[in-house]
Image (spheres, helix red, strand yellow):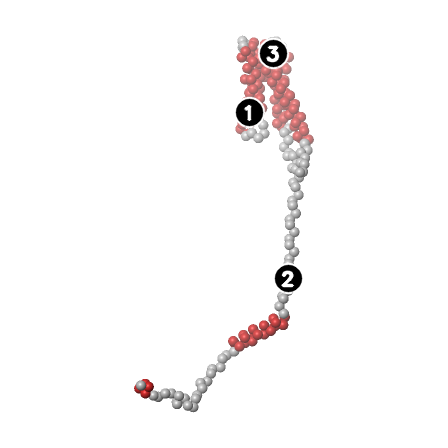
Amino acid sequence: MTETTAPAITTAERNYRTVKAISTGYTVATLGVSAFHLVELSIHFGGGWQSFLAPALVDGFVILGKLGDRPGIVKSARTASRAVSIIAGSVSLAANIAIGIIDHAPAVSLIGALAVIGFWVAEFLSHKLRPTTKRPAAPKPAPKPAPAAAAPAAPVKSAKDPKRVEAARKAAATRAARKAAPVAPVAPVSHPDAAALVDHRTPAAYI
């Protein structure tokens, strides 16, 4: 059983994985900051336990849009998912800025805005830096050698005696010559006593 080795990772793929990891980190940080600010903002405006559903109602669409904008999905679905992610991200950005204004804390607004903007930039770069080159294909197994063609058979010599062959040829030529020669007409043979051989007796003589 032969062992198959995985193709080597190219530099473009390694860079893409690094950018993707950073983008995932931005996503987690942004969702954490946004969830905290959304709950706090909802409680500030009189929300009860329902305030804890606000992150799912806003940031949940960000996650859905991120999952729908992936390779292998039809273009129309990817476009719609990207639009949903941008709209939900805009709502999260507004909530992050609003809670800083309400608490009279400009730093909170700045950090919340940078979190969302950083998420968008990381997502944009992760899409642009996606490698387009394919991995080198694994070497194909060597084709099996074609079966060797059979050697041509040696000509079989005639086992007939040359003398007999020559005699048969001469006999055939003689028969052909005889058939081709004209046949002489045979003359009628006259018999001196031919008249005597004729019986002139009448049938009455036999009675």
Q: Which residue is mark 3?
A: 100
Q: Residues within 10 Å of mark 3 (few under 14, many from 20)?
A: some
Amino acid carrying mark 2 in the image: Pro
Amino acid carrying mark 3 in the image: Gly
Q: Residues within 10 Å of mark 1 (few under 14, many from 20)?
A: many
Picture residue at 65% right of the left edge, 24% below the top:
21
Query: Residue 189, image x and y in percent?
Result: 45, 86
- Name of the residue lying farthest toward the front: 207
Q: Residues within 10 Å of mark 2 (few under 14, many from 20)?
A: few
Q: Looking at the rendered structure, which numbered label has been put on residue 168?
A: none
Q: Is residue 97 visible?
A: no
Picture residue at 61% right of the left edge, 72% below the top:
164
| Cα gap from disc 2 to disc 3, whole angstroms | 105 Å
Q: Which residue is mark 1?
A: 81
Amino acid carrying mark 1 in the image: Ser
Q: Which residue is mark 2?
A: 155
1 or 2: tag closer to the N-terminus: 1
